[in-house]
Image (cartoon, helix red, strand yellow):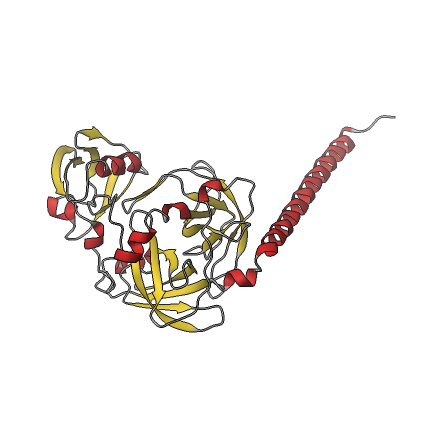
Amino acid sequence: MSISPNIAKEYLRLSKLNLIIIIFFYKFCFLISLKIFAQETILKKEKFNDLYNSIVSIHSIIPNEARTSKSLGTVRQGSGVVIDNTIILTIGYIVLEANEITIGLLNGKKIPGRLIAYDFETGFGLVSPIVPTKLNSLKMGDSSNIKMDDSIFILPSPNIGVGSLAKMVSRRPFAGWWEYYLEKPIYTLPNNPAWAGAPLINYKGEIVGIGSLFIRDAVSPEIISPGNMFVPINLLKPIIKDLVRYGRRTSNINPYIGLSSDDNSGRIVVNKVSKDGPSYKAGIKPNDVITGVNGRLVNNLETFYKAVWSSGNYGVMIKVDIIRNGKKMNFNINTTNRMDYYLKSNSY
């Protein structure tokens, strides 16, 4: 018995289609069972409702004259998580330079809050209620102990968004245009649109990170994979006492030069110079191409920041080499403490 070429091709096509359907079905069943297992695991220790009692919404009003009012807006919102009865941890840009903060509880109650600390190096911010309020805190876990196959949860305040199951997909450096660098942030999939300030929770119900950004390439810089980036909770542990007592860290403070730049073109190009900041006073201008720091060649944001920050404590003078309209130039920049550049909270 012979089979015509057309029938053979159709049979092969249907076989491939069935194989794809079978693979998809098993993947789907695996993900569903994984989700159920993860939820059951966490529920053995604490109910999700108990976790949510420690998660709040944060609504901030920033004055028009604030340094960040144009770049980040004058109305900001996100989530936060209670870490020590009256201290709420969030991502700092939600509350930076805020003159009015409202904390939203799970039961719908809203209470006034205040910014008690901010840390530019990590991006963490601390908020506390102004009026006495009973809050339940969550424990901080070990962010260095997350494995790729661990189930983790992104839990924003229900007033802000919906919680979701996630997977860590990478731990690689991140360099931001705002003079920000993290060596090993946590990248997760899938994306949760309410990431800002949301705690990343492990299967034990412990905080392992705080939501910072939406990332288009969470898996790898070469792969389009929309996800989120979280600041590891371990970065908070060495500075928490200083933040609570002084409102800022008192050691390992990076010198601030006051400019925004990117390296997307393979060169470090200045996009914006902060008015009255160190680079502004030195004469750096937008579209300048940065090529060196203190005689050391730099070719991306990571090498640029590390060269600046290794120059010494804030207040140190650094020499920056640039190219402007094809002409090589250099400038001396008197660095400063970034905390002294922005509007300060009444608490520090």
Quadrant where the N terminus sits is top right
Q: Which residue lies furthest to the right in this view?
A: 1
Relative image position of residue 325 (x, y in whole percent): 16, 37
User: Dividing the picture into quarters, in which one does residue 115 lie?
Assistant: bottom left
Horizontal side of residue 269 vs 87, given as left or right:
left
Residue under the image location 61 percent in, 55 percent down? 44
Above or below 15: residue 47: below
Relative image position of residue 306 (x, y in whole percent): 26, 36
User: Dividing the picture into quarters, in which one does residue 12 lie?
Assistant: top right
**Residue 82 visible to an observer of this rendering:** yes
Relative image position of residue 293 (x, y in whole percent): 19, 34
Horizontal side of residue 203 vs 281, given as left or right:
right
Residue 270 versus residue 305: which sits nearer the camera? 305
Q: Residue furthest top?
A: 2
Quadrant where the C terminus sits is bottom left
Relative image position of residue 297 (x, y in whole percent): 22, 29
